[in-house]
Amino acid sequence: MLQPDSTFDIVFSKINMPGVDGIELIRHLHQLNIDSAVILVSDEDPRITNSISHLAREQGLQFLGALFKPLTKSRIEKLLEKYNANFELELKSDHPAISISELRQAILNKEIEAYFQPQICVKSGRLIGAEALAHWRHPSKGLITAEHFIPLAEKHGFIQLIGHYILDYCCAQLGRWQSKGVDISLSINISPLHLNRLDLPDVLCAMAEYHGIQPKNLIIELTEASMLEDVGTSIDILSRLRLRGFQLSIDDYGTGHSSLDKLQQIPFNELKIDRSFIKYASDNEASRRILEATVDLAKKLKLKCVAEGVEHQSDWEMVSNLQCDIAQGFYISRPMPARDFMPWIESKLPRLRTSDIRVQT
């Protein structure tokens, strides 16, 4: 067994080994709090391997995937590519703690802004939309992504201020792009707390009208969990948004509660597959089947199907083969500030149309 002071970049583990099995090793790695990446090597039933893979993730290990025998160089290289990508993301997402006073000051100084991640039609390679993602440009701590400060804003009552500012910022930016001939839709996430405001449809209509954009070009994204607290009020607000012409997207589909129930209760236009299904589908049969079934369900319900988390060429090829409508992820482009969006369209987009996609940094 490994010792507490053991240091390895990657641990390859067979599921069945003399004297110890892969499950015991995973338990041991968790107890030692070792941060090495883990790859399983298996010739067992894929369902058993899948279960042990989930165990590794639940224990907080950096699990890269499973390799089934016979091993091939290309499959090993593919997982090592994922390790390099994960390592880069870890470096970029490590932020120091932030305080409520810093957040309050950020709102006053307008340090929080929207970054935009392109969304591409899988069939044509054409740019058809972007997702707006809140980022905080901290004066001393650098760029901080939404997951590090939005929960704090929700807890201390600042989410309405941030949400209103980001919504208005996005409407203004979409208006500027459309004036330059860029006809795209813009997806905007809203907090569960926004679904307590019965005037939300009126507020959004006023913003759209002020900035000269059509409601049909705004897609309001919400997670399944955000609709659980007060279902009646949520249906009221979301139905009125659709009546006013806005589009609705169910985000992180497959990770919440009563997913199918929400699809029949609320008039969604779009279904956004959770990135975890994309991430694991290439080496996990169950995830791949769920992904296939979700794409098929979206088509039968006449919903646009968006695959987020497309980070590798294999992900792009997979969603293309499944005939998913729209793709989004680091393989196409990282989120970028508004000032970089038009230059990206001019310099990078032609490569998408020739299927010569490269990761954009």
Image: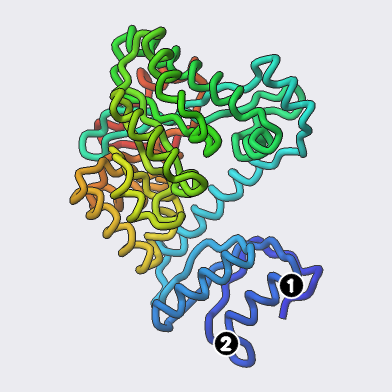
Spot occupied by residue 85 in the image (x, y as percentages of width and height)? 53, 48
Check disc 2 and report its element: helix, strand or loop.
strand
Spot occupied by residue 250 in the image (x, y as percentages of width and height)? 38, 43
Residue at the location (29% across, 55% down)? 294
Q: Is residue 227 left or right of residue 21?
A: left
Q: Quadrant of the N terminus?
A: bottom right
- Mark closer to the chain start, 2 or 1: 2
How crowded pointer 1 is (Cα within 10 Å; few <14, some 14-19, many 20+) is rated as: few
How crowded pointer 2 is (Cα within 10 Å; few <14, some 14-19, many 20+) is rated as: few
Residue 173 makes an appearance in the image: yes
Question: Which residue appears farthest toward the bottom when viewing the image?
Answer: 19
Spot occupied by residue 68 in the image (x, y as percentages of width and height)? 41, 75
Check disc 1 and report its element: helix, strand or loop.
helix
The residue singled out by tag 2 in the image is 17
Residue at the location (43% across, 83% down)? 44
Amino acid type for the residue under numbered disc 2: Met
